[in-house]
Image (tube, rainbow, N blue to C red):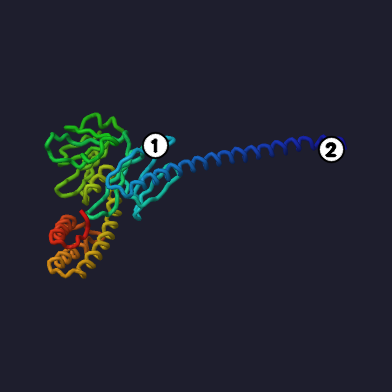
């Protein structure tokens, strides 16, 4: 019996060691899972925080603010279609219906946000622009008294801007630089690894250029807020995605105002007013087909007719 007890002792040791190893593996695995879950929750809190902060801008015509985070997150904003944008930080993400334009990954404790109400000519939605001081916008120098540029509207208090006579070496030293043009580019520096966008205020279009001079576009913009979205958007595809979402919302609001115009026309007894409402209905009836582009007379035509209504003391379609 004594020999039998001694012979079992090594097996007891082996059993204890194996059990201990399994417990340790479980403990460390559990601790790692808890840590990763905690990080995921923190990331989600930051994503949700940003979306809630932007909610405060919803009714603003023109507002800006700086958000500060407890850490230095790397936040990625993308247009994913289906009328949604995605705010993502690590594995945490939140899909939102906000029209957000942002140049790539935003890293830092502070994030600058700006919103503009998009009226074309009546209120459609808000555009949201995100950035920080690490992103710098370069545009041609304009002597005093010259026509205002689109980027003049970007608040210098929250975003870094510089007027230049020509592209210089400094741009290559900036990780996130945006080169803004207002005339046909003459030449491109193949070593210039920055986003270049041309805004044509005559044709109301934007064109994106790669460093080798390859053009993407032109794509139309409808109103100042959409033109600024081209400056902030990561690239041509991102802008096009944002524009397509905006187009659907413009279509829906056109239907709303078309119904309003029909109601006003049906109640009107003045032939002059009725005629103006009928012209408005014609413009709003089919403003664009799903694969086509918006009629260039859409905004200007509606503004003109709405002013005629006011001048004749007819109920206006929208307030100016």
Q: Position of residue 222 (x, y in %)?
A: 22, 51
- The residue at the point 17 percent across, 63 percent down is 314
The reply to whether residue 103 is visible in this rendering is: no
Say which mark, if any, is on residue 68: 1
> Quarter of the image holding residue 158?
top left
Q: Position of residue 183 (x, y in %)?
A: 15, 41
Q: Which of 10 and 262 lies nearest the eye of the viewer?
A: 262
- The residue at the point 45 percent across, 41 percent down is 43
Vertical position of residue 231 compared to residue 249: above or below: above
Cα separation, mark 1 vs mark 2, equals 71 Å
The reply to whether residue 177 is visible in this rendering is: yes
Instruction: Answer few, some or many: residues within 10 Å of disc 1's Cα (few below 14, many 20 plus, some between 14 and 19).
Output: few
Vertical position of residue 255 compared to residue 184: above or below: below
Say which mark, if any, is on residue 222: none
Q: Position of residue 53 (x, y in %)?
A: 38, 44
- The residue at the point 76 percent across, 35 percent down is 10
Please give left or right for residue 16 compared with residue 272 in the image: right
Front of the two marks 1 and 2: 1
Which residue lies under the disc numbered 2?
4
- The residue at the point 72 percent across, 37 percent down is 16
Q: Secondary structure at mark 1?
A: strand
């Amino acid at each position: 019996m004594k020999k039998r007890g001694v012979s079992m002792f090594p097996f007891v040791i082996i059993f204890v060691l194996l059990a201990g190893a399994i417990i340790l593996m479980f403990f460390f695995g559990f601790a790692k899972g808890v840590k990763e879950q905690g990080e995921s929750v923190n990331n989600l809190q930051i994503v949700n925080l940003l979306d809630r902060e932007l909610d405060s801008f919803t009714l603003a015509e023109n507002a800006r603010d700086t958000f500060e985070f407890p850490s230095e997150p790397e936040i990625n904003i993308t247009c994913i279609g289906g009328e949604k944008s995605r705010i993502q930080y690590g594995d945490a993400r939140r899909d939102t219906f906000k029209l957000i334009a942002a140049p790539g990954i935003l890293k830092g404790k502070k994030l600058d946000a700006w919103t503009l109400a998009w009226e074309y000519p009546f209120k459609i939605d808000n555009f949201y622009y995100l950035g920080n001081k690490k992103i710098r916008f370069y545009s041609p120098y304009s002597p005093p008294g010259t026509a205002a540029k689109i980027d003049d509207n970007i608040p210098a208090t929250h975003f870094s801007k510089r007027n230049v006579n020509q592209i210089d070496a400094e741009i290559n030293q900036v990780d996130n630089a945006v080169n803004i043009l207002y005339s046909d580019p003459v030449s491109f520096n193949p070593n210039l690894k920055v986003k270049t966008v041309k805004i044509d205020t005559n044709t109301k279009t934007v064109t994106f250029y790669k460093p080798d001079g390859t053009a993407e576009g032109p794509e139309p913009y409808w109103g100042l807020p959409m033109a600024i979205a081209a400056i902030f958007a990561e690239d041509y595809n991102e802008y096009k995605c944002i524009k397509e979402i905006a187009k659907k919302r413009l279509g829906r609001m056109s239907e709303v105002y078309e119904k309003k115009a029909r109601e006003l026309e049906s109640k009107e007894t003045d032939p002059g007013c009725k005629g103006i409402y009928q012209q408005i209905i014609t413009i709003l009836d089919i403003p664009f087909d799903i694969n086509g582009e918006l009629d260039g007379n859409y905004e200007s035509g509606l503004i003109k007719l709405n002013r005629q209504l006011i001048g004749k003391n007819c109920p206006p379609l929208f307030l100016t």
